[in-house]
Amino acid sequence: MGAVISFTNQKGGVGKTTSAVNVAACLAKRGKKVLLVDMDPQGNTTSGVGIGKKQVKSSVYDALIGAAATEDTVITTKFKNLSIIPSTISLAGAEFELQTLENREACAKKMLASVRNQYDYTIIDCPPTLGLLTINALVASDGMIIPMQCEYYALEGLSQLMISVKKIKKLYNPALQLTGILLTMYNGRLILTTQVVAELKKYYGDKLFKVPITRSVKLSEAPGFGEPICYYEPSGKSALQYMAIAKELMLRI
């Protein structure tokens, strides 16, 4: 059975979408069949793999509310082994529509049931909130990866997130596991960074991915060209870091 992994953090601007796109692309480049699911109404994951609005006939919104078969929403990208269920701004209204549905927390799980075994990994990019869309993603997932910056506010946010995850596990998905914590925008020269890393190792030592993702101009540029970093600058530092993350993830799940 293919693994379903959500990239989630209720704090925005932490490299969540960047990490979801690039880990998915690196897994695919390593020979795994991967499905990206864009659960964020902003649609940055969709544009990040070169899918334009005109290419999207039906989206994750349609599959979630049962207006389209999941198979009909999947788009094959130009990148080897990588497909995506795209998002559009229409997903912004899904929070309200899902409220009226039976088993509303499990809509994403139902959506993915017919396709998850066609892929080695399904990677879900969650919105930067702990609303119903994120809850749906976590209920559908086997594991979650939390991208986070080395800041004290990020540590506080992580504690709050883990409290929410504990509730989701208890109520809806007992099998949900913390797959890993991924350090992003990393700067090892800062004292604050070493202090935050020390705190993380103290409480989540075995969950920290070994390779952090450092700041990179090329990594910031790549989405504008609709390419994951392993294609935009395949021999660059960021590509090598994300390839290392993908390799470690394959060992974990």
Image (cartoon, rainbow, N blue to C red):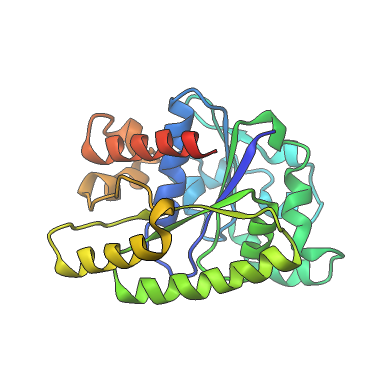
Where is residue 159 drawn, in percent x and y?
A: 47, 73
- Report which quarter residue 242 is drawn in: top left
- Quadrant, the C terminus: top right
Is residue 132 at all visible to an observer of this figure? no
Q: Position of residue 148 (x, y in %)?
A: 38, 61
How many numbered discs?
A: 0
Q: Nearer the viewer, residue 173 or 116?
A: 173
Q: Residue at the location (69% across, 29% down)? A: 118
At 52% across and 70% down in the image, what residue appears? 161
Spot the residue most to the right.
102
Give how far across and how far down residue 95 sits, in percent: 69, 69
Left or right: 11 in relation to 102:
left
User: Residue 132 appears in which quarter of the rendering?
Assistant: bottom right
Q: Quadrant of the N terminus?
A: top right
Q: Quadrant of residue 73?
A: top right
Residue 18 visible in the current orientation: yes
